[in-house]
Image (cartoon, rainbow, N blue to C red):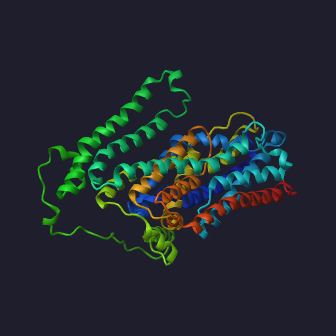
Amino acid sequence: MAELTEYTWLFAITCIWACIDSYGIGANDVANSFSSSVGAKTLTLKQACMIATVTEFAGAILLGDQTASTLSKGIIKFQIFESNPALLMLAMFCAIVGSSTWTLFATRMGWPVSTSHAIIGAIIGVGISHSGFEAVQWGLSDFTGVLRIVSSWFLSPISAGIVASCIFLATRYFVLAHDNSFHRALKAIPVYFGLTALIGSCYILLRKTKSPLETQDYVKIGFCAFIPVVVVLICIFFFVPFIRRKLLVGEYLCWYHFFVIPFLPKQRLIADMTEESPKGALEDEVNSKGLMFRLKSRINKTFDVDIHQTNDENVQRIMDSAVRYDQDTEYMYSILQIGTACMSSFAHGSNDIANAVGPLSTVFHVWKNGSVDGDISVPIWVLIMAAFMMDIGLITYGYKIFQSLGGKITYLSPSRGFSMELGTSLTVVTCSRIGLPVSTTHCITGATAAVGLCNGSSKSINWRMLGWCFFSWFLTLPAAGCTAGFIFFLCSRSPTK
């Protein structure tokens, strides 16, 4: 069928609102991936934003098309729009408007809501507004559609919490709780790096392959086994000697010494150093007028926020009651945490990009083909556009969610943050691979609460903040759904064609 050229204006407006929705996703959801790293003081806000712009973009481009198909056809029955395909374009447009409106409002209020909730609730809202409850694929009999997706919202925080707590408990009992924790960590860190590399390489190299053995793709399988071995060897011959000489011996080593550490002669001791490291950031003088100045001011506002500063005595009491471990041992986990934060961010980009590109890809498919039939693919330009706007949203508006998740639920340290991020990334990337659009907010919150409880006391959790997170999850779906459904009701029944 021919293109619906008379509705090009609707396709163009949908692209604009998809950019706005992606911006809100970046501001609200992307901060989840690095909240524990910033909360544990492993990374600054500026460093987290710089790394996230790369990892989120990579995750969206490499794996972002997997869950988009679930959002496109897994919620409402497209058959109800066969007689009028343009109405499906309008429905997806209204869904994006409803989702982005709620996400931006929640971000403005500092609420860490689920953008997966928002877009799925919005699509359900337009489906009910069009044809009633029969338009929605509830999946009550065969466990598909909405029921399958909703079940993942409850299973994902539990799964992420179990995985994260198991990792932290193993780390605590075998490494952190011993007097020689530093030496134990030197032996354990290569294993952790290898495990992280194995998980990441498998999901990247084996994507879109349901059964690698059946396809006889031994090259990919070989790389999946080879990469972790290389990472472990690098840790043994470069990372471990570097850390031992820097922290245990006390040599003055710079980051570039890492690459030549096996051949590097003994350096001066840190105690002998008298010069001070340069501190502070270079401040540019800019004109106080124009769009660029306002953008720069917004970025600086994000980077200057101290998420650890609080006037809440309850939050401060929670932080003070947590068990502290050896600082040198925690330092090693801070380096490892950067890697797991990158993987968690990559997982988020692969999963939550679908919240914006799923409905937009549907609109593009209908506009281009003039029908609702056929498989809906995700064009690469859609992924690039959405990923770029997610990065902009994080840089300019993500500090509000960093404050909520990074400094108000429980005490965070590098070893705890590493466990949270590895558990979250494993859960999210797994669900993304099988096509389940899980909520990264649910996963990181569940992992944070579970690891916080591993301190052995319920007083180590800010239950008020955690309860508000749970409440916002239930509020998101009906709020986005009612907004999108009401807009669709008005637009679809407008006398203007």
Question: Where in the figure is residue 365, as x and y percent of width and height?
Answer: 69, 40
Can the viewer see residue 30?
A: no
Give the vertical position of 313 relative to 93 (above or below): below
Can the viewer see residue 183?
A: yes
* The N terminus lies in quadrant: top right
Q: Quadrant of residue 371?
A: top right
Question: Where in the figure is residue 61, as x and y percent of width and height?
Answer: 52, 43
Residue 324 vs residue 161: left or right?
left
Q: Who's the residue at 61% across and 39% down the image?
A: 435
Q: Who's the residue at 45% across and 64% down the image?
A: 411
Question: Where in the figure is residue 50, as x and y percent of width and height?
Answer: 42, 57
Nearest the viewer among 205 and 488 is 205
Q: Who's the residue at 85% across and 50% down the image?
A: 132
Nearest the viewer among 448 and 379 is 448
Q: Who's the residue at 23% across and 57% down the image?
A: 247
Question: Where in the figure is residue 140, as x and y percent of width and height?
Answer: 77, 41
Q: Quadrant of residue 496?
A: bottom right
Residue 371 vs residue 16: left or right?
right
Q: Residue furthest right?
A: 495
Give the vertical position of 241 relative to 453 (above or below): above
